């Protein structure tokens, strides 16, 4: 089982604002190929770094999942429907990583 940690406030935001369930986030991790990108925007820098990826649920919903790894746990910061710009960035940067 994926060691996900979702605070009550984040869970409420996921369910009410983004209509995302924990199960969908788990499915995205399970269906994902393991390539994560670091959020390097100055106002999003964290220690440890904030990571993100575009994943797909079993029903084909594409989510942008944002998280931090700490103490062998995955702390979810947010997850929502991936927009076209996020998909483009993710595709370009992961392709670049593979080429390195």
Image (cartoon, rainbow, N blue to C red):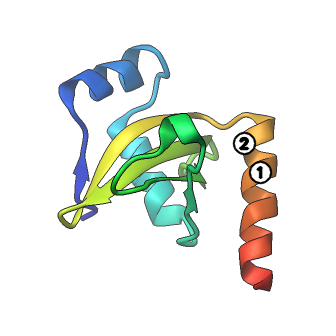
**Residue at 55% across / 57% down in the picture?**
38
CB under 8 Å between callouts 2 and 1?
Answer: yes
User: Label 1: which residue?
Assistant: 89
Q: Position of residue 2 (x, y in %)?
A: 28, 62
- Whether 60 is drawn above or below 17: the answer is below
Residue 70 falls in image quadrant: bottom left
- Whether 3 is drawn above or below 85: the answer is below
Q: CA distance from mark 2 to mark 1?
A: 5 Å
Which quadrant of the figure contains the N terminus? bottom left
**Residue at 58% across / 43% down in the picture?**
64
Task: Single out the residue that lies furthest toward the front.
Answer: 42
Task: Single out the residue that lies furthest toward the top.
Answer: 16
In depth, the one of 46 and 33 nearer the eye is: 46
**Residue at 36% across / 52% down in the picture?**
68
Horizontal side, residue 49 vs residue 2: left or right: right
Residue 79 shows which numbered tag?
none
Residue 98 falls in image quadrant: bottom right
User: Label 2: which residue?
Assistant: 86
Q: Position of residue 42 (x, y in %)?
A: 56, 40
Secondary structure category for the residue under label 2: helix
**Residue at 25% across / 39% down in the picture?**
6
Q: Position of residue 54 (x, y in %)?
A: 62, 51
Q: Position of residue 78 (x, y in %)?
A: 43, 35
Residue 77 falls in image quadrant: top left
């Amino acid at each position: 089982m994926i060691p996900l940690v979702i605070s009550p406030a984040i869970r409420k935001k996921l369910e009410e604002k983004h209509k995302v369930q924990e199960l969908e986030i788990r499915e995205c991790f399970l269906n994902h190929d393991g390539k994560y990108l670091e959020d390097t925007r100055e106002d999003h820098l964290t220690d440890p770094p904030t990571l993100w990826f575009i994943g797909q649920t079993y029903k084909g919903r594409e989510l942008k999942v944002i998280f931090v790894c700490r103490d062998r746990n995955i702390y979810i910061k947010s997850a929502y429907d991936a927009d076209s710009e996020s998909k483009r960035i993710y595709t370009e940067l992961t392709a670049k990583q593979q080429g390195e």
